[in-house]
Image (cartoon, rainbow, N blue to C red):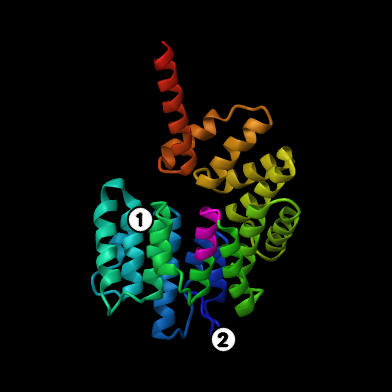
Amino acid sequence: MAAMGAGPDHLFNLRNNFYLGAYQTAINKSEIPNLSPEDAVERDCFVFRSYIALGSYQLVINEIDESAATPLQAVKLLAMYLSSPENKESTISSLREWLADSTIGNSDTLRLIAGIIFMHEEDYNEALKHTHAGGTMDLYALNVQIFIKMHRLEYAEKQLRVMQQIDEDHCLTQLASAWLNLAVGGSKIQEAYLIFEDFTEKYPMTCLILNGKAVCCMQFGNFDEAETLLLEALNKDAKDPETLANLVVCSLHVGKSSSRYLSQLKLSHPEHVLVKRVSSAEDNFESAVQSVA
């Protein structure tokens, strides 16, 4: 969880690496001396969430045992949820039990993980039930994402304003601002692009930053530059779902075949929203063909 109190923030760099998608860097640079027990748990949460982001679900499941603190148990639940479709129902059942437990249900990390899982399920109202109270920058940022998914940009803007009042320069505040600007569109796209450009100057280039800039370019209608950025992202991670999804869209606009990127996305991320939409469109087309055959 992103701390909002005073005093030195020993996890500042670790957090920012995680937020901006530099997951391996976050893992590699996680040996931080003189952490309090609470900070050590938070550090471990970011490290294990980095492994999850890299697809190493089983490592997280194996490493976090029954005696681990509640935040780490919550992260393990996320790994179990994402590891296979068969696990989803039992994981969500466990999650609901934990949230109902008065001794641990108010854990910021547990509420965050609940929000992430229910957002994956596209059950946005259930997600907000656990995240809407905020309390940490991570929760406020997740609320922004959820409200954007719900097309309730006015509520996303309210959450962003809270973040700006707490820390306007915080990495998550800047990211949330970029997400909202992209959702609003129009003249706001330029503001989003400048935020990602600022990240480019301050941090190592990641798939997340490259995709952010590429989406801005696509919104500008500059698909050639977007393709260049996305191919750079693909070189960094050939299985990154957002890179593959954006390459599918970009390829269609520049008149190139998108089938290879779509095939890769289907293989590595069968649950991705673009895969589901394409499958639904294919099914609808098939039904239409059958009806006139």
* Residue at 30% from the left image edge and 67% from the top image edge: 64
Eyeballing the image, is 137 above or below 278?
below
Q: Can residue 18 be seen in this snapshot?
A: no
Please tell me whether residue 21 is drawn above or below residue 84 in the rendered image.
Answer: below
Q: How many marks?
A: 2
Q: Residue at x 27, y 69 (%)?
A: 98
Circles 2 and 1: CB atoms closer than 8 Å: no
Residue 243 visible in the shown view? yes
Residue 285 versus residue 234: which sits nearer the camera? 285
The location of residue 281, given as percent across then percent down, is 47, 30
| Magenta region | 142-151
Closer-to-camera residue (291/223): 291
Q: Is residue 128 magenta?
A: no
**Residue linked to disc 1:** 57
The C terminus - image quarter: top left
The local crowd at label 2, few if under 14, some if 14 to 19, many if 20 or more residues have their Cα within 10 Å, is: few
Please state if 43 lies on the left or on the right of 215 as rendered: left
Q: What's the magenta bit mostly, secondary-structure-wise?
A: helix
Label 2 secondary element: loop
Which labelled disc corresponds to residue 8? 2
Query: Residue 55's x, y, as percent?
Result: 41, 52
